[in-house]
Amino acid sequence: MNNEPSNTREDGGDDGPAQSPESSIVDSILDGERKTVFENKQLVDSNTIVDHNRIYGRDEQLAAEARAFRDTLDGERPPDLLLYGPSGTGKSLTVKAVAEKVKGRATQNEITFDFVAVNFKTMEPHSLDRAVWKLGHQTAKKAGVAWDIPRKGVSTDAKYVRLYEIVDRHFDALVFILDEIDALTGRVGEDEPAYSRLLYSLSRVMAEQHVDTLVSTVVITNHPKFRENLDSRTDSSYNPTGIHFSDYDATELIEILNRRRDAFKEGALDDGVIELVAAYGAKNEGDARRAIDLLRDAGEIANRNGETVVTEQHVHAANDSVVKNRVLEMVGGMTLQKKLSLYAAAVVADVNDGAAPSPAVYALYREICQRTDRDVYTQETVNSHINKAGTYGVLESERTSGGFKSGVHLMFTFTEPVEAVIETLEEDDTFDELDVSTARSIARQSLRDS
């Protein structure tokens, strides 16, 4: 006798296979009509290379880049460029837009021109060998050929040779766009930063590697002082034309966002949304990239809620989520000592208008470790731990000599709300035995004593 349950109804009908609640929910989402506030979502993806006509407030920089790349169309090597200024001010955006435009004109003139862009901040490890491999991989992709060099087991010199073979065989002119090059520090203990050796090789490739291709570089950095650490040979051969990018203000950010308004359906942006996103962007040191990402995130929240209009509430929610996620991402993989170091810096900054001098930070860190029976590390190690948080865009550091008895020291400046950093760290059990009000009192005393 078959005892399996039947799907036959008493009225003779058949419902078919039973559905679980979970599958019903999934099916309703996948099979239902898709509601979205977006018309062209790519326009609010900060990684999208937009037409130069959409770029606002950078006419001077666009003109300088166009004049430099114009040489390519005349069969001449364009000058090396150094684009410098704060994050999110249009450095990568403008040069890629111009390079894309030049590529089209070069094709019309039967010139094989292209550009290879690599961001070294997102690359691990920050070694010369890894950088050359990455450049080779990206160049081969642009050339439409195989990059047959493994990451390991082949010398850096061999990687260079294969890279320059591809460059010489497949391009009349090529620009290497080296983004956040100061992150390419190399291995600890090396006399010369990895970026110095890379720039030397690229600046000498036509002369020393017998490459006929017109090769030039565009270096993008937030910290132009990286040049102070160049080897004397590199400093002599690498002579770029500098182009400065200043912060955007709220008014400029409004115009930038308005030029991407057509990413959304007509009527999908409520009054005040663009202005609020711009205000948040202005607080983040005029960072247009973050403002564009925030506008997109607000739209995605509206989509998830099944709403057809993006409101200011969606913007506030998106900003809270961005800050929280950035801090959580940073804290998640941290060791105990790194968390203690960052916590000390955040508390000092919290009582000192967002700035945390390293002597006061170390004094608080040492006191916290002693009160919680933790090992006390050296100030150099603590500074290193805090500096690593800078790779997540949460803080910046600058060497300074003013205002403290201890002479030259680091000044840590938080670019995200320190309250969010403190609150996120305090969610860890490590901080159960710490009282933030006591920590603030110690921080104030440390500032007075430093």
Image (cartoon, rainbow, N blue to C red):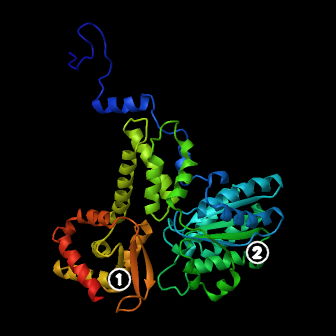
Question: What kind of residue is marked 2?
Answer: Met
Q: Residue at x 53, y 62 (%)?
A: 248
Label 1 crowd (10 A; few <14 / some 14-19 / many >=20): many
Query: Closer to the camera, 127 or 288?
Result: 288
Question: What kind of residue is marked 1?
Answer: Ser
Q: Which disc number belongs to residue 206?
A: 2
Horizontally, is 335 left or right of 298 in the view? left
Label 2 secondary element: helix
Query: Closer to the camera, 401 or 192?
Result: 401
Q: Nearer the viewer, mark 1 or mark 2?
A: 1
> Where is 38 relative to 48, above or below?
above
How many labels sit on residues? 2
> Where is 447 relative to 260, above or below?
below
**Picture coordinates of residue 25 (x, y %)?**
33, 32
Q: Quadrant of residue 350?
A: bottom left
Q: Residue at x 79, y 56 (%)?
A: 106
Q: Quadrant of residue 35?
A: top left
Query: Closer to the camera, 189 or 387?
Result: 387
Label 1 secondary element: helix
The quarter in which the C terminus is drawn is: bottom left
Q: Earlier in the sequence, mark 1 or mark 2?
A: 2
**Picture coordinates of residue 318 (x, y %)?**
39, 50
**Picture coordinates of residue 60 (x, y %)?**
67, 64
The quarter in which the N terminus is drawn is: top left
Query: Closer to the camera, 441 or 152?
Result: 441
**Picture coordinates of residue 93 (x, y %)?**
60, 59
Q: Which residue is mark 1?
A: 358
